[in-house]
Amino acid sequence: MTPTLLIQVVLAAVVLFSVVNFAALHTWIERKQSAVMQDRIGANRATIFGIRALGLFHPLADAIKMFMKEDYIPAKADKLLHTLAPFLSMTFALVAFASIPFGDTLRIHGYEIPLQVAPLNVGLLYVFAMMSMGVYGVILAGFSSNSNYAFLGGLRASSQMLSYEITLGATLLGVVMIYGSLDLQEIVRGQGELLWGWLPKWGCLVQPLGLFLFLTAGIAETKRIPYDVPEGESEIVGYFVEYSGMKFGMFYFTDFLETILIASLTATLFFGGWQVPYLYSSGFYFPWIDGGNTVFTLPHLVVTFLQVGAFIFKVVFFCWLFMTIRWTLPRFRYDQLMRLGWKIIFPLSLLNLLVTAAVILI
């Protein structure tokens, strides 16, 4: 195995480990954040040797419970597709993280390591391709269960995800036009430039309407409140209503993975990704001090640590924001959801694209 391939394998393992564990922690965050918002304690019963640890053992207890539950498959269901569906949903949600940069380039022992599992010049297209493939898991879950409720949930989920993915694509074309690349790493580096000599060129500043539309459509992609009509527990409608045990757990887990993915894309495309304002490879540079020549030099490893930390902080912030929205707004009716997607959000994304093109042309 060549050193380059070994480095990529290690990076992939680190990203996979981090994302899976953060998604597991996300289940605890959801319980505790909703408890704080509703003035209650939240999950705190699972203990190890009498230690509650604020309920942090509940994700572990949930995993054990789901593995121990019976794996039930309806009598007339398609057993192959029924088993394959949750694996498809979870797999494509995980592999989408491969193209998201969580840092610049790490230089160590003569090696330059791009902090990105798969440095692709069409990284944005790759992420959208993986998100689109995830729809198949939802469709197959509803189709293979031999249940009218599951089938209705699968239809709702697939139509919702496809509708809002179109808006996501149209919205991000404005970002691509401004930074001139489909490479997520290059888009992040482009946001390190300064507008008018002092303001970071972050996507939220040059595409404010695009940011709003992306957040609206991105939350719909996660299929969570206020966009959770594919599941709708109170309506007994859901594409995984016929799933039990860890197969149900995989669908449940996928929702958290998609939430983290949308948070990562929001940070990457609109809030500078790993960029820290005025922090460059040699240290901090402030253009308004001493005629723009002042640089506070920092070691390379310190700069890299600050960049990775900044990316993690931004992702955690947006996960918190999505969770706040999830526990604040009521569920849309299905007709309201589709009307919002096709008659309001999608036309606005086209308008944003036209205005961006006109500004660039001028």
Image (spheres, rainbow, N blue to C red):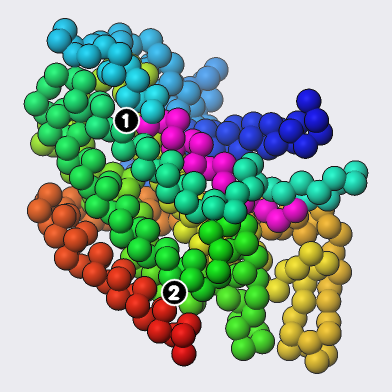
Q: CA distance from mark 2 to mark 1?
A: 33 Å
Q: Main secondary structure of the magenta part?
A: helix
Above or below for 65 versus 75: below
Q: Secondary structure at mark 2?
A: loop
- Which residue is at 12% across, 57% downward? 336
Taking the image as shown, residue 14 lies to the left or right of residue 40, namely right
Label ID, residue 299:
none
Above or below for 118 versus 47: below
**Residue 90 belongs to magenta span:** yes
Above or below for 196 versus 50: below
Taking the image as shown, residue 78 lies to the left or right of residue 126, namely left
Residue indicated by mark 2: 207
Above or below for 202 versus 256: below
Asked whether 219 or 34 is in front, the reply is 219
- Which residue is at 38% across, 10% downward? 68
Residue 114: x %, y % from top left: 72, 49
For the residue carrying disc 1, how many other residues have a C-alpha within 10 Å: few (<14), some (14-19), or many (20+)?
A: many
Q: Which residues are magenta?
A: 89-105
Q: If you read the primary sequence from the N terminus, does the residue marked by circle 2 or circle 1 appear first?
A: 1
Label ID, residue 137:
1
- Which residue is at 53% across, 42% downward? 97
Residue 22 in sight here: no
Residue 180: x %, y % from top left: 55, 69
**Residue 81 belongs to magenta span:** no
